[in-house]
Image (cartoon, helix red, strand yellow):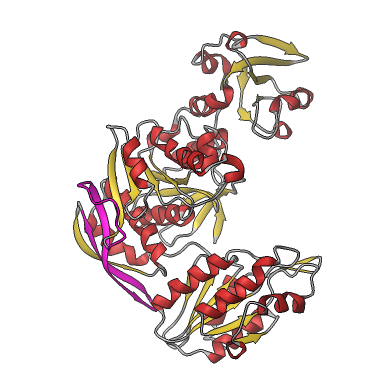
Amino acid sequence: MQVKQNVQLNTTQSIQPLLAKFGIETADIMVESLVLDSREVAIHSAFVALKGHVRDGRDFIPQAVSLGAKVIIAECDTQQEHGQTSMREQSLIISFFNLSAQLSALAAAFYKYPATEMLIIGVTGTNGKTSTVQLTSQLAALLDKRSASIGTLGSGVISRAGECASFGETINTTPDAITMHKLMAQFAQDNVKQVALEVSSHALVQKRVAALKMDVAVFTNLTRDHLDYHGTMQAYAQAKREILAQPELKFAVLNGNEVESKQWLAQLPHSVTPVVYGMDDESLLLTDAHQVCLAKDVEYSSQGCRFSLVSSWGECEIQLRLFGRFNIFNALAAIASQLCLGKGLTDIATVARQLVPVAGRMERFSDETSPTVVVDYAHTPDALKQALLALRQHSEGRLFVIFGCGGDRDKGKRSLMGEAAETCADVVMITNDNNRSEDPNAIVSDILAGCIHPEKIQVELDRKRAIAMAVAQATPQDIILVAGKGHEDYQIIGSETVAYNEREYVKQMFERNIT
């Protein structure tokens, strides 16, 4: 559940001392905001026109002028143009060299460096950013540290129960530089003490967080992704490592079971302390004498998992209500971050069992007399396979899976989804998942093309009925994975978008005692 939060900032100031920090002399003009989108320009705005990666913001200067922008800060192509000014109607246009790279510093100065008032944890990596950020913020809240998060799920203050008082949605995983520092200012004014944020490779290359003070950088893992943007895996990997250049960085929390972490260690500045987290087993790659936060003797159950935590801060037993090996990694990264920032190991062990998963990401619903139902966003063959393999470790009985495939989308994956489901689950129930304009029965036929054990498979196109059927067939020892929708709150049937919240439906089933 998200509760809308509204924190008003008073940012009215003269543009003169702000730009003086960047070697620009200009008139004493009062502005109330910096904006990147010309459609958001108001009479007291300073419109920032960047030479962007996709669009050139300078093309929108006429629109900003027509909307009454007092000041326009426009990126220029040469150092010689830096600081030059001109008037267009009532708007003062100021040339700023290398503005894209300097925007984070400009925004930090405009909002009076709010990040310096808080502890900041940046999380980067291909997978696990969202869960690690949410678990980190939850853990801080459980340790009585007012905390907030920024990332894929939006931004806001996190409660002890994992709920978010939202400051708004984010268009990108990592917001633009102006939005980032505005959020930091809102958090600081709202008495937030710690912020965890997702840091994408795009954001690092585009310098969106270049001037953001960061205390801890967390690296999760690296797999193939975003090569349409970065070109090569080498460039993608180097982009991730750019986070090591963050101002005032003190700790780098690295996945010890990830080979890429060796490159991170090689590039680590002497001022940054490495902390290795991960599984203390044969897959551990970083075995040198670093500070560590490792799990060993892991036990899985239908209620979650438990393990012995071996760390440079001491040893203890950790219990989690989370499913999957990957969630142990996410939790270890969160725990290591809090240890770096001075939290006590005993306190962490006491509250860790209260951590809850990200909404719609291996989210568990259960009681003592019913099967466990897990709602997850998995909607690709590999994601479905990995989710089922993770749940198999927790299952004391049979493993059910309910899933479908989207219409008017990649038909080639449908048989692969069927194969993954049939191979990894005991009972397979095929249903609808955004069929759009396609015949649902045709989609089912495509899925069945990858299956060779018809005795395992049932078809029920109504998702609610499919869930109810699976629950009726299962025992309290069984686990039912409902895959594909996750946190989404709609179904696309034909040309109509229908309200459908799978998490709420499953939750209500348990509240009615599965009747």
Name, please, the residue furthest toward the left.
314
Q: Residue at x 74, y 70 (%)?
A: 435
Q: Is residue 370 magenta?
A: no
Q: Left of 89 or right of it: where is 254?
A: left
> In the picture provided, is 297 more to the left or to the right than 23?
left
Q: Is residue 68 left or right of residue 8?
A: right
Q: Residue 88 occupies which quadrant of the picture?
A: top right
The span shown in magenta is 282-311
Question: In this rendering, is residue 440 above or below 213?
Answer: below
How many numbered marks appear? 0
**Image location (x, y in percent) of residue 253:** 33, 47
> At 48% from the left edge and 68% from the top edge, which residue is drawn?
386
- Secondary structure mainly formed by the magenta segment: strand
Q: Nearer the viewer, residue 244 or 181?
A: 244
Q: Quadrant of the C terminus?
A: bottom right
Is residue 465 depicted above or below 357 in this figure?
Answer: below
Residue 304 magenta-highlighted:
yes
Coordinates of residue 310 in the picture (x, y in percent): 22, 59
Quarter of the rendering occupied by the N terminus: bottom right
Give the quarter of the image for residue 413. Answer: bottom right
As drawn, 262 above or below 249: below
Q: Is residue 289 visible?
A: yes
What's the residue at 67%, 19% (across, down)?
A: 71
Question: In x, y percent, where is residue 242?
Answer: 44, 35
Residue nearest the viewer, comparing 286 with 90: 286
